[in-house]
Image (cartoon, grey):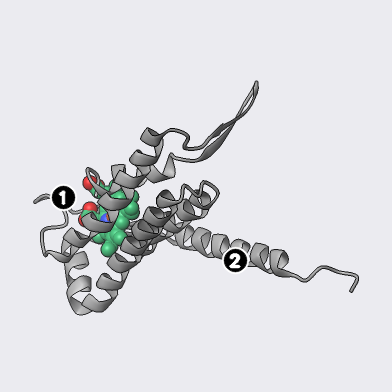
Amino acid sequence: MRDMLDPAADNIFDAVKTVYTKTGVVETVPKTEHDWEKIRIGAVTLAEGVYLLKIPRPFAPPGDENNSSGSDATELSPAQIKAKLEADPVLWNAKIEALRNVGLEVLEIVKEKRVAELWDAGYNLDQACESCHIQYWYPGDKALLEKIDRDIQERYERSQRAGKPPRGR
Ligand code: HEC
């Protein structure tokens, strides 16, 4: 996660951004072949790398129990994660495939250098990571759950507005 999926995802997250500074707005978009190559490396690493999560292995180093004890525990312990995965391997695999699909989506975008679509791809990527984490890592994190719900609702409302037929006919 920390050393492979996370940095690979950053290659995609960081590819497009708008930063508001005192002197104006700074837009980052991929321009050179090197910029696009970086995104492609991110996409391939995610699409292939996520399949490593199909191989059973310890979730954390021995002794690392996450924030899983006490009344304000928000995280599952590695043993709880393992038990949850074994109880429903189909769900675990679905989360893996969801992330792989975003990787493949980004590869298609890179092929045709469709800059505008990188924004949505970044959002989809974030959702693919979080929807697994919220199930398996920190299901106790209510605030985050609510935030994801709100985001989904807002996007839905925006798409409804965008999809409305023009008035006056
Ligand atoms: C199929 C499920 C799944 C997907 C998809 C997934 N993760 Fe994770 N991730 C986990 C689990 C489970 C843990 C908790 C492991 C632990 O610490 O016990 C975790 C932990 C992490 C950590 C903390 C690792 C550490 O060393 O403390 C990071 C960072 C992370 N994920 C990033 C990502 C990013 C970025 C993505 C998307 C590109 C992603 N993950 C997609 C399941 C997933």
Residue 93 falls left or right of residue 162 = left
- Give the SS element for disc 1: loop
The picture places residue 137, in percent across and down from the top left corner, at: 29, 60
Residue 136 falls left or right of residue 169 = left
16 or 40, which is in the foreground?
40
User: Please, what is the three-letter code of the amino acid marked with disc 2?
Assistant: Gln
Taking the spot 21% from the left edge, 65% from the top edge, the residue there is 81
88 or 4, which is in the foreground?
4
1 vs 2, front mark: 2
Vertical comparison of 21 with 72: above or below:
above
User: Please, what is the three-letter code of the amino acid marked with disc 1?
Assistant: Asp
Taking the spot 62% from the left edge, 62% from the top edge, the residue there is 154
State the residue position of label 2: 153
Give the spatial CA distance, label 1 vs label 2: 36 Å
Crowd rating for badge 1 (residues with CA inside 10 Å; few <14, some 14–19, many 20+): few
Label at residue 64: 1
The picture places residue 53, in percent across and down from the top left corner, at: 19, 61
Q: Is mark 1 within 8 Å of ligand 1?
A: yes
54 or 80, which is in the foreground?
54
- Give the SS element for disc 2: helix
Q: Residue furthest right?
A: 168
Residue 36, quarter of picture: top left
Quadrant where the C terminus sits is: bottom right
